Amino acid sequence: VFNALEFADKNSDVNYKKDTIIHNPQIIRDIVKISGCRFKIVARPDVEEKQEENKDAVPSPPAPPESLRPRPPVVCVMGHVDHGKTTLLDALRDTAVVDTEFGGITQHIGAFEVKLPTGEKVTFLDTPGHAAFTAMRSRGARATDIVVLVVAADDGVMEQTVESIRMAREADVPILVAINKIDKPGVNIEKTMRSLAKHGIVCEALGGDIQAIAVSALKKLHLETLVEALTLQAQLMDLKADPGGYVEGVVIEALVDPKTGKQATVLVQRGTLRKGCIIVAGTGWAKVRVLNTAEGASVQEAPPSTPVSVLGWREMPSAGDHVLEVDSEKRANEVMRWRHNQRMKEKQAADWEVIASKESEHRAHYRQQLAHKRALGRYRIKPSGPRQKMIQQDTHPTLSVLVKGDVDGSVEAILDILETYDEHERVKLELVHFGVGQVTPSDIEIAQAFNAVIYAFNVEVPPALAVDARKADIPIKRHNVIYKLVDDIKQELSARIPSRQ
Ligand code: GDP
């Protein structure tokens, strides 16, 4: 194991920060060779590369059947644009508020509950459409029990209706149809059902097993029937969870509120979330301080299928993150460290891939340059042996330059000026290589191969390299004003004009 103190690969965009650990000495040698970057390597023979113990939080084993209790269904509303998903959710949310003592404004926390007079509840995810459904699925969190497919009776099955059916099917989530906008004159409910049947959604009225409720989201017609149908569907599905044991859930939404600070909505899927619980989610964790419902009521606890807005986050989670309860703050910190390290490792592996591909790109480019010169027959390159200058066969005098600059902008500016040089001049100007960063051994090699002058703009020349360059007879010219650098190039060009005899 090696500990790279600070390393920037000047030939690529990758930076290794302090304490980056590179395990493979060969990789380190390669990096040094390619970049010429000098850095300190500390060998730590006492650190063995052993399999790190998994410190992550893990879900509890499945609960025994006797501890399972019925839980409300969690519902996602999907369907074609403009078919009334948002209006339906708004109408249902209003219904939810009516019979609560807090009455008035429901907060948007990403999900809300609707309670029937019978006491049964349905939880609705508050973001309509594919995005919410996909986001919840993409992280493996199966948050949705039932999809309500909204189809406008005046429009029938449309592209996104079909797409929603496909997505629900793929996720193996049952569908309940809400035929909307039935308040509009001349709408034909049966025709809508028949068009759905063509896509495999056969409603009960047509002899199938899919419940379809005709509603008007705008006029709030039959909304209760819709909610009842959902609870019936939930009973058929026998949805149950253990309200005891460690809490598990999913983050529905996460945001920083200007007043209350870090806030995330958790949909509890197992156990009962209480104040004081310590939970981890992705790279976030919280000691639960406040639990709020969508109606803004502060509650003491949230059993399965309840969405609650949680305050008390030390680090923010992200939507879709899996929530797990842990025993102590110490344990939460341990999990955070472990997850952070895992991420760093993944990032490092990805970085290394970038370096490797940049490196091969760079080598290919260099090889191509050499091959090109050879093909032109202008240079004879001695691959090995004592350092010897290339023998220039071209009789046309040439000034070869290699440009290194401190930033992209300065290098570009210099290249722009060089480009304006007229190629029909008596002395040819040739750019053999350029780059950002200090002068490296590979620059010296290239300069030597092409008999080039190195122009270093605003960058350091490591003393050891300056010595090497002098020995190899490679002039390195340092400048920090662009026009002076250009003047210098002009002087070099005129010095190469053959005298007429
Ligand atoms: P979304 O794109 O599916 O969320 O559709 P919206 O909820 O934004 O509704 C689109 C339009 O349809 C809006 O102008 C709504 O007022 C209207 N709309 C929604 N539901 C109904 C309904 O039941 N009846 C009628 N007449 N219009 C509705």
Image: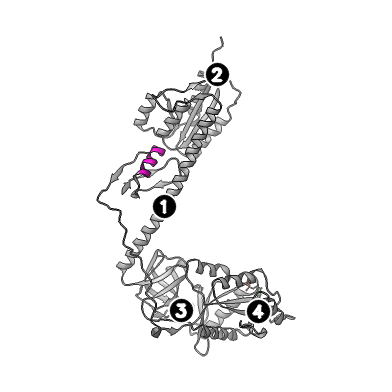
Ligand 1 within 8 Å of the CB at mark 4: yes
Mark 4 — residue? 180
Q: Earlier in the sequence, mark 4 or mark 3?
A: 4
Please report whichever mark, 3 or 1, sits nearer to the chain's N-terminal start: 3
Q: Quadrant of the C terminus?
A: top right
Q: Check disc 4 and report its element: helix, strand or loop.
A: strand
Circle 1 residue:
349
Q: Earlier in the sequence, mark 1 or mark 2?
A: 1
Q: Mark 4 or mark 1, which is nearer the start of the sequence? A: 4
Circles 1 and 4: CB distance less than 8 Å? no
Q: Which residues are magenta?
A: 26-36
Label 2 or label 4, whichever comes before in sequence order: 4
User: What is the three-letter code of the residue carrying label 3?
Assistant: Thr
Q: Quadrant of residue 285?
A: bottom left
Residue under the point 24% across and 51% down: 46
**How far apart in space, not on screen, are marks 4 and 3 (Cα)?**
27 Å
Residue for badge 3: 306
Q: Identify which amino acid the numbered label 4 is placed on.
A: Asn
The reply to whether the magenta stretch includes residue 485 is: no
Contact? badges 2 and 4 (CB < 8 Å): no
* Residue 217 visible to an observer of this rendering: no
Amino acid type, mark 1: Ala
The image's mark for residue 395 is: 2
